[in-house]
């Protein structure tokens, strides 16, 4: 039996889950204070607070860290990588702690786990980080020399859900064509062809608008906005990635509130949510074209997949393309543990970053 601790850090919390093989023994969300998660605090120091909180939970539950077989963390912003389970080493640690490819809360997973893994003498893995890149050549062209499209998405959840959907269809992920859509604070719409995610919108920069992200914007309008003298780079970035989308129209990031407003016929909320569903459906259609129309299943997942009214709007527009499967929520801790378990059982080898 393999005992695996999965760690998924967010901006103000850290989700952890303990698994014995496939069985989840417990999951818990650790909340952190504003002081502990301040952007002004040293990253390794912030990771240290989180590591101590994690160890405290294990000890309260009478879990002996020495019994763990491996740690597995959600991958942060690394260089473009193929899908799979990677051994976390010094090269991974350095790129994440120095934010070589950008900063995201998920970078903290490795910074939390690698010192603990070395102390315990056990491996640390990461599975399908957000920079999974299986693009085909045509997908990389943006239309401007020197500005390639980058693969950055909710790869961990989408890959796990794709495997789940294939199992439900009594198929292998490596032999099925899917369009998989993650609906959360950001939205990723991806084309999967026989085990490879060959195209996806960059959830920070492209595609449908979401709860807090703008998605694709009119290019010249964006240029004028950035040169109006009112925004610096940091302010413009926040506007596009955390103050856009639903939040910019309706002033909330609580989609359950938005869904209730839609159900009650709110004249402001209804057209906004209809527009988001329209954009999601349009992107799904684009990914169907990427697969030459050979789509066997469309899979909707993520937190907003719980919203029946919103999902109904999307399904109405895409049902002619392929059967639609809804797998709501996120199973990222389970996906992390499953990726580590495949390596521990020898079903696949661990990949190396360099």
Image (cartoon, grey):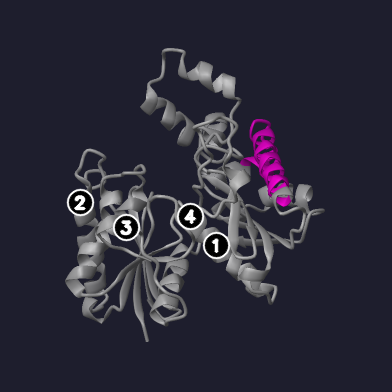
Q: Tag 2: Cα neighbours inside 10 Å, few (<14), some, or many (≥20)?
A: few
What residue would you read off at disc 4?
132
Would you say the residues marked 2 and 1 are in contact, meaning their CB atoms lie under 8 Å apart?
A: no
In the rendered structure, the answer to whether residue 35 lies left or right of residue 337 reads left
- Rendering quarter of residue 301: bottom right
What residue would you read off at disc 1?
159
- How far from the left and from the top, in percent, is residue 340? 40, 72
Q: Secondary structure at mark 2?
A: helix
Structural distance between the alpha carbons of marks 2 and 3: 11 Å
Q: Nearer the viewer, residue 83 or 115?
A: 83
What residue would you read off at disc 2?
44
* Labels 2, 4: front one: 4
Q: Residue at x 48, y 55 (%)?
A: 132
Would you say the residues marked 1 and 4 are in contact, meaning their CB atoms lie under 8 Å apart?
A: yes
Q: Residue at x 25, y 63 (%)?
A: 114
Query: Which of the image's four quarters has the N terminus?
Result: bottom left
Which mark is first along the chain, 3 or 2?
Answer: 2
Structural distance between the alpha carbons of marks 2 and 4: 25 Å
Residue 56 in view, yes or no:
no
- Rendering quarter of residue 344: bottom left
Q: Secondary structure at mark 3?
A: helix
Structural distance between the alpha carbons of marks 2 and 1: 30 Å
What residue would you read off at disc 3?
109
Q: Find residue 219 and name its label.
A: none
- How far from the left and from the top, in percent, is residue 240? 48, 31
Q: Residue at x 57, y 19 (%)?
A: 221
Residue extent of the magenta highlight: 261-288
Q: Secondary structure at mark 1?
A: helix
């Amino acid at each position: 039996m393999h005992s695996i601790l999965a760690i998924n850090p967010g901006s103000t919390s850290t989700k952890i889950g303990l698994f014995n093989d496939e069985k989840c023994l417990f999951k818990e969300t650790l909340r952190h204070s504003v002081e502990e998660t301040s952007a002004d605090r040293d990253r390794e120091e912030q990771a240290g607070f989180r590591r101590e909180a994690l160890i405290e939970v294990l000890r309260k539950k009478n879990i002996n860290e020495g019994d763990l077989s491996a740690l597995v963390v959600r991958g942060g912003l690394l260089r473009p990588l193929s899908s799979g389970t990677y051994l976390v080493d010094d090269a991974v640690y350095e790129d994440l702690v120095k934010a070589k490819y950008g900063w995201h809360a998920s970078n903290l997973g490795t910074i939390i786990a690698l010192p603990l893994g070395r102390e315990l003498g056990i491996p640390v893995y990461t599975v399908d980080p957000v920079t999974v890149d299986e693009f085909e050549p045509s997908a990389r062209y943006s239309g401007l020399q020197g500005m390639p499209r980058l693969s950055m998405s909710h790869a961990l959840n989408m890959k796990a859900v794709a495997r789940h959907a294939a199992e439900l269809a009594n198929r292998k992920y490596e032999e099925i064509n899917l369009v998989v859509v993650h609906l959360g604070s950001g939205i990723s719409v991806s084309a999967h062809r026989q085990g490879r995610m060959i195209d996806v919108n960059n959830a920070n920069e492209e595609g449908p608008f979401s709860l807090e992200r703008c998605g694709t914007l009119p290019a010249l309008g964006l240029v004028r906005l950035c040169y109006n003298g009112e925004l610096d780079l940091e302010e413009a970035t926040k506007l596009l990635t955390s103050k856009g989308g639903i939040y910019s129209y309706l002033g909330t990031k609580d989609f359950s509130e938005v869904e209730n407003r839609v159900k009650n016929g709110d004249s402001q909320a209804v057209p906004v949510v209809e527009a988001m569903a329209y954009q999601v459906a349009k992107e799904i259609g684009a990914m169907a074209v990427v697969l030459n129309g050979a789509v066997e299943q469309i899979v909707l997942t993520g937190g907003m997949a719980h919203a029946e009214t919103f999902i109904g709007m999307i399904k109405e527009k895409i049902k002619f393309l392929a059967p639609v499967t809804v797998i709501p929520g996120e199973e990222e801790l389970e996906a992390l543990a499953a990726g580590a378990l495949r390596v521990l059982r020898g079903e696949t080898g661990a990949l190396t970053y360099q």
